[in-house]
Image (cartoon, rainbow, N blue to C red):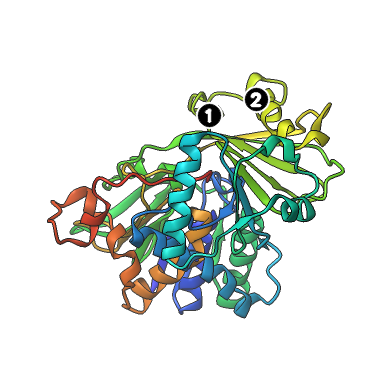
Amino acid sequence: MRVAIIGSGMVGSSIAYECAKAGAGVTVIDAGRLGGVASAASFAWLNATSKAPKSYYALNALGMRAHLELRRDFGDCPWHRQTGSLEWRTTDEGQAWQRGNVAQMRDWGYGVEWLGKARLAQMEPDIHLAAIGDAPVVYYPEEGWVDPVLYAAWLLRAARERHGAELRPHTEVTQVLTRNNRAVAVLTADGERIEADVIVNASGARSDGDLGVPGLPMTSTPGMLGFTPPVPTTLRSQFHLDDLDVRPDGAGRLMIHKASVDTGLLPGAAVSTDGREAEALLEATRKALPLLQGVRLEAVRSTLRPMPRDGFTCIGAMTHMTGYYVAATHSGVTLAPYLGRALADEIVRDLPHDAIAPFSPDRFFLEQTATSASAELVGVKPVEGPA
């Protein structure tokens, strides 16, 4: 079986690795360099917290477990950091939501505990306790973060060296070719035709693009990250304060994301290290980390973050099209290794996974009944962290 995969970010590289491992002849095609676009500008938070309904929580929990299970294939996984997450909210509304979420997560078996200020000070002395005040602090010990491009590089290398996959960076796909309503090949910008028995579109925000086949309804949004220069910090855990997210990024650097900054961005708009968006990131972070006084951002990154129209992952065979699959999600960092395995089982081994059934593209193109798998998602608005 020949499988062509469009996109080489965390999701695309996972699908490539698992399909090649299952015995398929895999070709990975990316319009740019390997590692993806959105993946390279992701906060990369591994988590399943606040992800309702339960089917979506369960899918993300499987993703977290799949990251740990990759150690069977790779031993040391240099891209994976299971450091735990801290969270506090400063408003009455935020704290009420937090209490409800903690109760829900405990009921579903997720690792979560309330953390006293003395223990927090011992764990993370760089965090300014006065900035927290009387706000309750929650600790999620199972969470962590990933180096997305490093992850993709290792999985693509293994797919090529162990299982013979072909990697085609800087090769733009302009059309998916069909015959009798079956996908049979992709056409590249230079006119090359690459034949395949199955084609998987894992191009993220480009999943709604015009490739000659139906696209997904997407509401992808711009997002921005800020990066400090190396600073004298011992911060180990990431923390989430209202709409602010901060984590270590190696060599003493910190990565900063703020949701309210994202909402002010326009698609394609340039951001800079001395712009108002960068200052907003720093101003919010300095309150919790005074060591950033006088520090300017070293770099910023922005991208269009993939988001299917209803906010939930979309994974599986495209409705009314044989041999064409899609994989689009805002939670790609958490879900990637599990989605790769699930699609490989379905495509190569003909073994469908029940966990991805509610997230089929069918929910956008077929009328849903009250008892259908996707009906659970109707009317539920996912609460998502940074991509």
Please rate how many residues cluster around mark 1, counting C-alpha atoms within 10 Å: few if below 14, some from 14 to 19, many from 20: some
- Judge left or right: residue 134 versus residue 191: right
Residue 212 at x, y = what percent?
29, 45
x 68%, y 60%: residue: 83
- Judge left or right: residue 183 versus residue 120: left
Q: Which residue is mark 2?
A: 280
Q: Regarding mark 2 in the picture, which secondary structure is present there?
A: helix
- Residue projecting furthest to the right: 232
Disc with the residue nearer the chain's start (1 vs 2): 1
Question: Is 106 located above or below residue 378 in the figure?
Answer: below
- Quadrant including the N terminus: bottom left
| Marks 1,2: beta carbons within 8 A | yes
Question: Is 89 located above or below residue 75 in the figure?
Answer: above
Q: How many marks?
A: 2
Question: Is 202 located above or below residue 156 in the figure?
Answer: above
Q: Which residue is mark 1?
A: 260
Q: Regarding mark 1 in the picture, which secondary structure is present there?
A: helix
- Judge left or right: residue 118 versus residue 212: right
Residue 140 at x, y = what percent?
59, 58
x 44%, y 75%: residue: 24
x 75%, y 31%: residue: 297
Residue 95 at x, y = what percent?
50, 41
Q: Amino acid at mark 1?
A: Ser
